[in-house]
């Protein structure tokens, strides 16, 4: 009781909240503190002696690239964040980072940019100091800016070696007309080549998005929320709230099937069927139901997989799933084939399986097993601070709230067969389909 | 009777065998790793890829009791999993299960290992994918991975280390189901097995596991002596010409006489980290080639095999090797065709950046060989490594994997022992080790590049022609004088090139 009172007092003093972890998929309490400037600070204590994962997620990604000619900019900006400040110029930043011996890096995707360090928990203050400084005081010359653009082009160059990457780029460009998911996070190549000329825009970009209201600090490991919150206050307390509100144009409803084909015989023939799906939500059943549905229909235990991959051996690999993104994105089913002559057959078989599902739904036992699988998959993975921090960041990206992780897994339990049938009928419709193919032929030819 | 006694003796010897244990009573799962000393060096000549095919069938096939699909269906609600990885000298089978299902999972695990079905339809499926890997995937998915595998093909030519773990096009075609059955019986025995277990398990469980593993074949198996890297006459370059390649992906390699077994390895770890720590911006190669000149996405160096460098941020376990080489990885740089298209001022460049980048990397290595690290550089790099190495073993899976790999090198706990060695090192040790083990005058280089680039690049390398850096005006305008002066020196830096060949992509790995 004494301890409980002490805990409650502490919560009142710090303004923090800690939701108990009972029956939640994440078996550790998520401590959150919203600072006055809008920065959210998340701490999860985890038994990793001497080790802490320090993650910062900024809710800006290629989704926010609404202006023409600057696609790929969120990712480019992630590179620029390593170019130094007045207090920690690039070389000094590198020296200090090296001195703390952490594994540090960053990555960008459609909806967010993540900066992360995992290392010695006793160096947490240095981590805060370094990161808070560059998030508030980044300074780079125009020359540095132009130079870094070459590294981004180098990244595109290495990625381009994969025909799958090329096909994905074509797919997004075909499936979307208006929404910024039309371009990949790398951006259009012509914009990448033009990046050196966008210095002024880069300053604007930093001013818009590198603000506390777009950002969450996540610390997992051998730490206490009190210490994390105190450091956050000390180093991020004076960070100023911004004013920019990002408006992303919504994608109009797709009214007919589309297709894109890459003529390339260097890899096995490839087919992907991509249906327009919903945005992520932790209170609407559609996305959790889609996760269950795609697991049932396309995993190695599915009838479709057993037929195409195991018995007939016309398909090498089959997979499917819906993208968890802030705005409506694609539900994709992908197959790597043995022969290009089977592309139409495989497409027809996938569609047939989906159509049958719309009326018959899933076997109740399979539904229960799938719910179990989703939960145990998560539970098996969370054995280190970095993985937990990454999971939290994924849901912070989507809703701003790490508790969405727990809510999503709770919703899996409530998915019914009726939900599955309803969402199959709602989303797997021919007019919402974009077909992407790769084969040696000049045309895809899949109807 | 004699045979019976011998069987008991052998079984007893396995029961007494050391098992690497990592008890974690608070963990929710159990991880079991079975590491066999075989690997691709165990592949018979003409049947290259046989160990990988065997493991493919063990892990993607059924057992005498259950079909592959039945196994998948049973494991499905538990999200339990298993996989096999084959490297040059070891095969590791890893099984992971939540503690709630350990007892039910166990017979499936032992079935996979002890009573595999070796069914014809599973065989067909597994081989189709392996054939596709050697025929297409390696050439078409990542030019970086391609150049790395092409380097090993060149470096170890004529030895049992030459072929890819997955084999060669012709050898994979020749593998039969009977080959796999025979290979399984011969090279997956209890005599070449190391057992590892981590997580939340009981002593009784371990006793049962050991007893069951004792039923593996008793015939002694020891893999053949691993082939050593060749020492070339000078710098030997193989350019792989590939239609449509967007850049030039470069790997270099030269034999290295030490591995994690050696005391000197710790000294090389420091030098290597300073020169080109994997996926870190601190290395000299990264600083010079990417950070200052923005020529590519990154540049790193290696004193041992690093699996899937494009995907892994930290070095994974399960790939211990006795044959070693020192390598440089220069990620794809621009080719002339692209530079001409992108920048008017570069409309007449004869070659892209590969020759310059190679010269720059070699010059950095030479600089360290010649001048060594300063005391400050040494101290900073050592301090970094002593902290950073702990991240290699963040997960129970990697903790166990590293402990098992330690045995391969005659060590008990490499991470701990390397830390002790690092603690005792001096800058003198590091600089002496670099002088002793590193060289750039004799090395192999592979470059996967566009067909449009190959001949001009080959000519430039063969003739040791000057290769001035071709910057866009936008970047060049702001470069400080010392950088441009250094560029001038790099452009004519001599490489001891003795041989350059151009190989069409279709002709590689034959």
Image (cartoon, coloured by chain):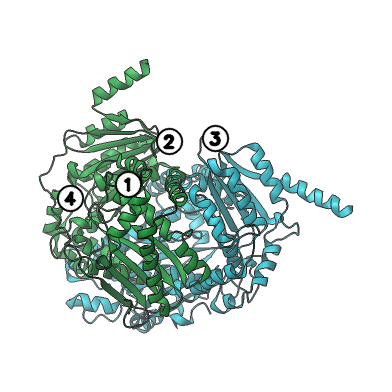
Q: CA distance from mark 3 to mark 2?
A: 19 Å
Label 4: which secondary element: loop
Q: CA distance from mark 2 to mark 1?
A: 17 Å
Q: Do callouts 3 and 2 point to residues on the same chain?
A: no
Outermost top residue: A2
Marked residue chain, label 2 = A
Q: What label sits on residue B25 in the rendered view? A: 3
Q: Judging from the image, what is the letter of the chain drawn in cyan?
A: B
Label 1: which secondary element: strand
Eyeballing the image, is A164 above or below B437?
below
Q: Is residue A442 left or right of residue B240?
A: left
Of badges 2 and 4, the one in the foreground is 2
| Mark closest to the chain's N terminus, 2 or 4 | 2
Q: CA distance from mark 1 to mark 3?
A: 30 Å
| Quarter of the image where one finds residue B473 | bottom left
Point out residue A214 in the picture as x, y percentages from the top left corner.
Answer: 19, 45
Q: Residue at x 49, y 71 (%)?
A: B133
| Mark closest to the chain's N terminus, 2 or 1 | 2
Point out residue B349 in the picture as x, y percentages from the top left corner.
Answer: 25, 80
Q: Judging from the image, what is the letter of the chain drawn in green?
A: A
Q: CA distance from mark 2 to mark 4?
A: 33 Å
| Mark closest to the chain's N terminus, 1 or 4 | 1
Marked residue chain, label 4 = A
Q: Which residue in the protein does label 2 denote?
A: A50
Marked residue chain, label 3 = B
Q: Nearer the viewer, residue A304 or A242?
A: A304
Q: What label sits on residue A139 in the rendered view? A: 4
């Amino acid at each position: 009781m004494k301890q409980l009172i002490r805990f409650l007092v502490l919560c009142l003093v710090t303004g923090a909240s800690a939701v108990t972890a009972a029956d939640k998929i994440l078996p550790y309490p998520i401590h959150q503190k919203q600072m006055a400037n809008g920065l959210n600070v998340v701490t999860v204590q985890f038994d990793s002696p001497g080790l802490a994962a320090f993650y910062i997620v900024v809710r800006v990604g290629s989704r926010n690239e609404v202006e023409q000619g600057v696609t790929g900019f969120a990712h480019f900006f992630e590179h620029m964040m390593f170019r130094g400040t007045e207090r920690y110029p690039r070389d000094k930043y590198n020296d200090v980072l090296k001195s703390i011996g952490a594994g540090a890096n960053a990555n960008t995707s459609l909806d967010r940019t993540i900066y992360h360090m995992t290392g010695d928990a006793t160096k947490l203050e240095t981590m805060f100091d370094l990161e808070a400084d560059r998030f508030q005081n980044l300074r780079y010359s125009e020359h540095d800016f132009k130079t870094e653009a070459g590294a981004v082009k180098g990244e595109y160059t290495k990625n381009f070696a994969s025909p799958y990457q090329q096909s994905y780029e074509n797919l997004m460009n075909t499936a979307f007309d208006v929404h910024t998911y039309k371009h990949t996070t790398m951006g259009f190549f012509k914009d990448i080549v033009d990046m050196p000329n966008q210095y002024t825009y880069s300053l604007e970009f930093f001013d818009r998005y590198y603000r506390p209201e777009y950002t969450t600090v996540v610390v997992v490991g051998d730490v206490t929320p009190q210490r994390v919150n105190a450091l956050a206050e000390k180093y991020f307390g004076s960070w100023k709230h911004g004013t920019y509100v990002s408006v992303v144009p919504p994608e109009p409803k797709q009214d007919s099937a589309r297709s894109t084909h890459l003529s390339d015989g260097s890899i096995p023939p490839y087919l992907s069927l991509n249906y327009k799906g919903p945005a992520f939500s932790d209170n609407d059943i559609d996305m959790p139901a889609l996760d269950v549905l795609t697991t049932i229909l396309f995993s190695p235990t599915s009838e479709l997989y057993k037929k195409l991959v195991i018995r007939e051996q016309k398909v090498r690999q089959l997979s499917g799933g819906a993208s968890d993104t802030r705005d409506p994105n694609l539900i994709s089913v992908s197959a790597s084939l043995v022969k290009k002559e089977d592309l139409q057959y495989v497409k027809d078989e996938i569609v047939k399986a989906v159509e049958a599902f719309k009326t018959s739904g899933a076997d109740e036992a399979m539904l229960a097993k799938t719910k179990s699988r989703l939960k145990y998959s998560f539970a098996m993975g969370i054995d280190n601070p970095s993985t937990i921090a990454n999971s939290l960041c994924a849901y912070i990206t989507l809703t701003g709230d790490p508790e969405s992780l727990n809510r999503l897994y709770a919703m899996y339990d409530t998915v019914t067969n009726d939900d599955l049938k309803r969402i199959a009928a709602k989303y797997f419709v021919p007019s919402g389909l974009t077909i992407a193919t790769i084969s040696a032929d000049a045309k895809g030819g899949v109807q | 009777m004699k045979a019976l006694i011998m069987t008991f003796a052998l079984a007893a010897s396995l029961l007494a065998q050391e098992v690497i244990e990592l008890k974690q009573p608070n963990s929710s799962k159990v991880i079991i790793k079975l590491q066999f000393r075989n690997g691709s060096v165990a592949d018979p000549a003409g049947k290259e890829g046989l160990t990988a095919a065997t493991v493919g069938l063990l892990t993607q096939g059924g057992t005498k009791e259950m079909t592959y699909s039945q196994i998948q269906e049973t494991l499905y609600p538990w999200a339990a999993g298993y996989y096999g990885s084959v490297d040059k000298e070891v095969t590791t089978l890893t099984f992971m299960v939540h503690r709630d299902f350990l007892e039910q999972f166990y017979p499936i695990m032992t079935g996979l290992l002890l009573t595999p079905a070796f069914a014809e339809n599973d065989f067909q499926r597994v081989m189709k994918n392996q054939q596709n890997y050697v025929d297409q995937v390696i050439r078409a998915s990542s030019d970086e991975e391609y150049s790395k595998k092409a380097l090993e093909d060149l470096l170890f030519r004529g030895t049992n280390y030459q072929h890819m773990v997955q084999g060669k096009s012709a050898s994979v075609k020749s593998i039969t189901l009977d080959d796999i059955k025979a290979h399984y019986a011969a090279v997956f025995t209890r005599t070449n097995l190391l057992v590892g277990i981590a997580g939340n398990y009981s002593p009784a469980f371990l006793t049962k596991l050991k007893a069951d593993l004792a039923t593996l074949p008793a015939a002694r198996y020891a893999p053949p002596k691993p082939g050593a890297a060749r020492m070339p006459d000078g710098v030997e370059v193989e350019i792989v010409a590939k239609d449509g390649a967007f850049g030039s992906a470069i790997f270099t390699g030269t034999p290295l006489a030490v591995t994690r077994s050696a005391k000197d390895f710790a000294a090389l770890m420091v030098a290597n980290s300073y020169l080109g720590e994997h996926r870190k911006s601190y290395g000299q190669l990264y600083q010079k080639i990417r950070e200052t000149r923005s020529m590519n996405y990154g540049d790193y160096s290696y004193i041992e095999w690093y699996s899937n460098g494009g995907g892994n941020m930290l070095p994974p376990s399960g790939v211990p090797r006795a044959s070693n080489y020192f390598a440089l990885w220069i990620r794809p740089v621009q080719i002339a065709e692209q530079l001409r298209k992108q920048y008017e001022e570069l409309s007449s460049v004869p070659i892209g950046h590969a020759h310059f980048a190679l010269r720059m990397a070699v010059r950095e290595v030479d600089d360290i060989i010649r001048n060594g690290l300063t005391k400050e550089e040494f101290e900073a790099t050592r301090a970094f490594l002593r902290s950073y190495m702990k991240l290699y073993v963040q997960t129970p899976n990697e903790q166990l994997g590293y402990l098992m790999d330690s045995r391969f090198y005659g060590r008990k706990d490499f991470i701990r022992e390397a830390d002790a060695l690092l603690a005792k090192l001096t800058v003198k040790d590091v600089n002496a080790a670099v002088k002793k083990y590193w060289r750039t005058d004799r090395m192999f280089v592979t470059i996967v590049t566009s067909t449009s680039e190959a001949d001009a690049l080959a000519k430039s390398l063969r003739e040791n022609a000057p290769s001035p850096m071709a910057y866009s005006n936008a970047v060049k305008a702001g470069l400080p004088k010392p950088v441009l002066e250094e560029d001038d020196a790099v452009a004519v830096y001599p490489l001891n090139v003795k041989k350059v060949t151009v190989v069409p992509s279709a002709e590689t790995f034959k």
